[in-house]
Amino acid sequence: MKDSQILSTFSELSAPAVLELPLQPPPRVLVFDACHVGVILRAVLFMEAVIAVGAMFGVHTFLDWLGRLSLLTGGALPATLAWLIAACSLKKPLARLPRAGQYVAGVLLGALAGLYGCGLLALAGFTESMPWLASAFLGALLSALLVVALVLRAKGRTPAATAARLSELQARIRPHFLFNTLNSAIALVREDPARAETMLEDLSDLFRHALADQGESVTLAEEIALARRYLAIEQVRFGERLRVEWVLDGQADNARLPPLLLQPLVENAVRHGVEPSATGAQVKISTQRRGSSVVIKVTNTVSAPGRPGHGVALENVRDRLSLLHDVQGQFQTALKDGVFQARIEVPA
């Protein structure tokens, strides 16, 4: 099945402490992380918006505003990048500080960045009397806002938030799938006991994996293994109606994905491609490493219109991918010429 052009139109409580032993302090973690492409882009855009508004004061024409904006950007942009580089480079030392210390360090770095930007403007002859103190306070204020935004972003990635979304995704392994699988196994008990046993083992492994606490991310290789077990179960159920093709790139196996991200896409292909069609459908799963990114595609033919879904699983996949990889994680779907494809792109 040729699918390379389908998306061409897309751009338990702890034990009581023993009195003789001191309690260990909780491990310190970084409350804000600037080492993300999405963070850098948003910080630069936010800074540019602030500078653009500030440049409006004291000008009378659009050309005067544009000239002042260009000059101020020459000082503010390097200062912003300097703050981001420093915050990212000092990631480990900052993590050793208490929470309050990390906030203070972020604000102090902002003040230094403000002075740096003011120095650049002084070299460019922006004005005779440079606002050094105002620049330091402005840098501290903007960095404080950025630190708060990064802390809120980090809280969005906490286990409590991801666990809620993971629970929703796990619920997509629907009860009727379990019933259908068990019925298929019962039908095989007399005809082919060995095959029925294998099928139940696959089902057991699938649900053990789905209910396990796997943390924030797993490897693509683990997700592939889970998808294979799921399709092995469905192969018994649908027989020749389910035609599976694997095109896997071993260099992509270490890419990180949220747990249970691939299985719902495969299930979606079976449900909407194979299940409603008397002749079945072809399902293709492909992975490919392209430079610093990995592309994952789940493609299925659609020969008969099935019952439309609500898109909950697809939307959940998109949200969880964005939660883990931000702008570096992309998810697209397309239906073209009787072929549906879900495409994922993540960092390698």
Image: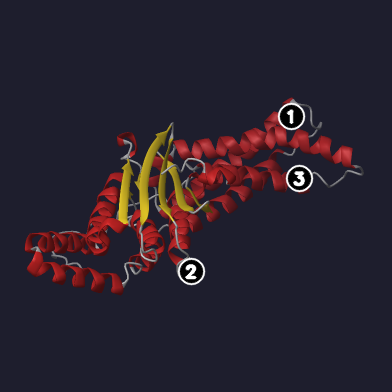
Q: CA distance from mark 3 to mark 1?
A: 19 Å
Please name whichever residue, 77 or 268, is drawn nearer the observer in this view of the structure.
Answer: 268
Quick one: SS at disc 3? Answer: helix
Which marked residue is nearer to the observer: mark 1 or mark 2?
2
Disc 3 target residue:
52
- Location of residue 12 by image quarter: bottom left
Quick one: SS at disc 2? Answer: loop
Q: How many other residues sit within 10 Å of disc 2, few (<14), some (14-19) or many (≥20)?
A: few
Furthest residue toward right? 60
Give the quarter of the figure containing the C terminus.
top left
**What residue type is disc 2 on?**
Pro
Q: Which mark is residue 122?
A: 1
Q: CA distance from mark 3 to mark 2?
A: 47 Å
Question: Residue at coordinates 47% horizontally, 39% vertically from top-left?
Answer: 88
Q: Which mark is residue 308?
A: 2
Query: Does residue 106 show up?
Result: yes
Please name whichever residue, 267 or 38, is drawn nearer the observer in this view of the structure.
Answer: 267
**What residue type is disc 1 on?**
Ala
Q: How many other residues sit within 10 Å of disc 1, few (<14), some (14-19) or many (≥20)?
A: some
Does residue 157 appear left or right of residue 80 in this picture?
Answer: left
Q: Earlier in the sequence, mark 3 or mark 2?
A: 3
Furthest residue toward front? 279
Question: Residue at coordinates 35% horizontally, 59% vertically from top-left?
Answer: 280
Whole-percent x and y of residue 183? Answer: 20, 73
Q: Is residue 77 above or below residue 298?
A: above
**What residue type is disc 3 on?**
Ala
